[in-house]
Structure formats: structure tokens, C-alpha cells
Image: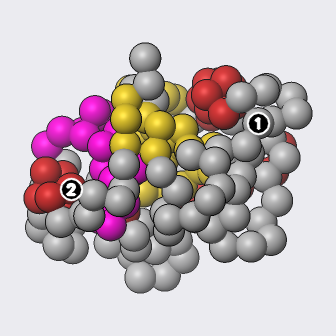
């Protein structure tokens, strides 16, 4: 299974507020030839690292594609760019962020790194990942989602959006 994280904390000039932008991004995944097989709820999440930037809306999609990881990541970056994402500063606020989290239990130390090198440290990824893959285990660490979440500090607040 392939998992993609979606996040935004700035309004898009085309799609509006972050939640609407993320809904549009799910559509863009489908228009790019990726099949969205399942999606999580949306979560409002504190920025990581802690900062004064706006809170994020985050989710995870399980997708199906014949693309390999490198081509898939390039596709995700094209979608981000089409939505106005500019990569200038690490951890900057963004209109859209699409991260390739995992491709089954594939481990890659090349490009792209798989699984995503920080997913086990991020509640904003793990909470929605639990919605679409409750039994998923980190292929390097051997930990399930509950164990990884238990290791994260309380500063990483996540709240389901209704």
C-alpha cells in the first residue's frame, strides 16, 4: 500500500481555505492518474516544530498507482507546484504539502527515502495514517502506529475536524 500525507496551513488563491485546498488536492491526485483508494479524516494540527505560524489541516490518503516511488514523488511535487507551493525555507507555512510516506514495507536509503524519515516522529502524520492503515507497522522500527504515537510529546496537538 502507498500512503501520501496531505497538509496545508495557508489559504490558496484558487481553492481558498486549507481544508478546501486539500479536498481539491485529492481530486488532483485522481486527475494525475493516481487512484485514491481511501482517505483519512481531516485533522487540525499544531505546527512542527512549534512556532507561531498558523495551525495545519492534515490527512493521509492510501493510493494505488503503477508509478515507482521516484516518479510518484515527482508527480506529487508537480501537483504542489500547480497549487502554488514554493519551496524556499524548510518548515515554512505552505499552501499545500504532499509527502510520500510509505510504499508498502519498501525501505529505500536513496531518493526518495522510504519510509519517510520523520513520519514516526509526527503526530500530524500518524493520527490520520491510523484512519487508513490501523495495522501498519514501520518497516525499519517494527513499531505499530500506537507505539509511535505514545512516544510523541504533548506539544504535537491533533484534533479531528468535523
Quarter of the rendering occupied by the C terminus: top left
Question: Which residue of the protein is positioned furthest toward the bottom in this rendering?
Answer: 109
Q: Is residue 121 magenta?
A: yes
Residue 72 highlighted magenta (yes or no): no
- Residue wearing tag 1: 11
Residue at the disc numbered 2? 149
Q: Nearer the viewer, residue 12 or 155?
A: 155
Picture coordinates of residue 96 (x, y %)?
Answer: 68, 46
Q: Can residue 105 be seen here?
A: no
Q: Is residue 147 visible?
A: yes
> Residue 82 location in percent, x, y?
83, 43
Find residue 29 and report its image quarter.
top right
Q: Considering the image in quadrants, where does the N terminus appear?
A: top left
Q: In the rendered view, tell whether residue 138 sits above or below residue 66.
A: below
Q: Residues within 10 Å of mark 1 (few under 14, many from 20)?
A: some
Residue at the image position 18 percent from the left and 66 percent from the top: 151
**In this rendering, would 16 be left or right of 26?**
right
Q: Which of the 4 quarters of the picture holds residue 132?
A: top left
Q: Nearer the viewer, residue 80 or 41?
A: 41
The label shown at residue 106 is none
Q: CA distance from mark 2 to mark 1?
A: 28 Å
Q: Position of residue 55 (x, y in %)?
A: 56, 46
User: What is the span of residues highlighted in magenta in the rendered image?
Assistant: 120-135
Vertical order, 60 against 27 (above or below): below
133 sits left or right of 91 in the view: left
Amino acid at each position: 500500500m502507498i500512503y501520501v500525507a496531505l497538509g496545508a496551513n495557508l489559504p490558496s488563491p484558487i481553492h481558498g481555505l486549507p481544508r478546501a485546498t486539500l479536498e481539491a488536492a485529492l481530486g488532483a491526485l485522481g486527475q494525475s492518474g493516481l487512484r485514491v483508494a481511501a482517505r483519512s479524516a481531516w485533522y487540525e494540527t499544531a505546527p512542527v516544530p512549534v512556532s507561531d505560524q498558523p495551525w495545519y489541516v492534515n490527512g493521509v490518503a492510501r493510493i494505488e498507482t503503477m508509478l515507482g516511488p521516484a516518479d510518484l514523488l515527482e508527480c506529487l511535487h508537480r501537483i504542489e507546484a500547480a497549487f502554488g507551493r514554493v519551496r524556499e525555507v524548510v518548515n515554512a507555512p505552505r499552501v499545500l504539502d504532499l509527502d510520500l510516506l510509505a510504499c508498502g514495507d519498501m525501505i529505500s536509503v536513496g531518493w526518495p527515502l522510504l519510509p519517510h524519515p520523520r513520519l514516526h516522529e509526527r503526530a500530524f502524520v500518524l493520527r490520520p495514517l491510523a484512519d487508513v492503515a490501523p495495522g501498519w507497522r514501520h518497516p525499519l522500527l517494527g513499531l505499530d502506529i500506537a507505539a509511535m504515537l505514545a512516544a510523541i510529546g504533548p506539544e504535537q496537538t491533533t484534533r479531528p475536524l468535523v
